[in-house]
Image (tube, grey):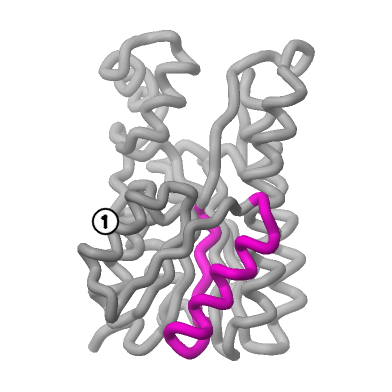
Amino acid sequence: MEQLNDKIALITGGAGSIGAATARRFVAEGARVVVSDIDAAALDALVEELGEDAAAAAVADVTVSAQVRRAVALAVERFGGLDVAFANAGIFGAVADVADYPEDVFERVLAVNVRGPFHVANHALNALLPGGSLILNSSVVGLTSDAGICAYATSKHALVGLMRTAAKEAASRGIRVNSIHPGPVDNVFHHRIETVATGEPEARAAAIFEAMIPLGRHATPAEVAALVLFLASDESAFMTGATIPLDGGMSV
């Protein structure tokens, strides 16, 4: 039986590897999805791949409340409701000590990584049907941190506070709210982080990071999507307010 049969989902950051992998998995499990991103061409290609009966594109900047509201409204108007919202869009920023961190970069990271998920939560919680699920994509550094990543780590820690508050507020409607905390993922986004953080070429930077992961490898986007599927499905019906690491043991 399909785990998301007749469910309707919104995925932000839908043009990235994790968002696209999640959209593919959701559709394979019987859901219809609205994928949202600032990259219109990538969204169009993904919708063409998934089929217009199962997917729709909403070009939106998550830092702009009205654009997120329209993406939520598209799910309701096109497919008839909203059962799942996955706040997945994010950026990294720069690597610098707190004393030297550029203020404009710090503010931009918080705008995308905190204000963006807030907008998703704010609008999705007004549309989610009873029994629905809101999932926030944080990071392993939403549970830990390291030198040089104050903006990214601060933003990802902030999502835990947003998630825990929303989980308590939405529980009376049977709506679950959880955060996921991936470690390094084998995708363009994280390989860029690794090269910036280490100053090494991509292959060497990836090896340095894998040496810090007890399981000794990066996660795949499909593995992240599998966790999001679990949280979106009725298999996690009694789980809310949880911070779930998917980091190969980095946060242990």
Residue 203: tell me if it is visible.
yes
With respect to residue 179, does 233 lie above or below? below
Q: Quadrant of residue 34?
A: bottom left
Magenta-drawn stretch contains 76: yes
* Residue linked to disc 1: 45
Region rendered in magenta: 63-88
Residue at screen point 53% across, 41% down: 140
Q: In which quarter of the image is the N terminus?
A: bottom left
Image location (x, y in percent) of residue 24: 27, 65
Residue at screen point 60% across, 63% down: 242
Image location (x, y in percent) of residue 11: 46, 63
Residue 180: tell me if it is visible.
no
Q: Is mark 1 on a helix, strand or loop?
A: helix
Left or right, 193 with reference to 143: left
> The disc labelled 1 sits on which kind of residue?
Ala
What number of labels is visible? 1
With respect to residue 185, does 210 lie above or below? above
Q: Mark 1, residues whose alpha carbon is within 10 Å: few (<14), some, or many (≥20)?
A: few
Image location (x, y in percent) of residue 69: 64, 69
Left or right, 238 with reference to 49: right
Residue at screen point 44% across, 40% down: 183
Give the camera-side residue of 221 and 46: 46
Magenta-drawn stretch contains 44: no
With respect to residue 219, does 116 lie above or below? below
Image location (x, y in percent) of residue 156: 63, 43
Residue at screen point 72% across, 17% down: 101
Left or right, 228 with reference to 96: left
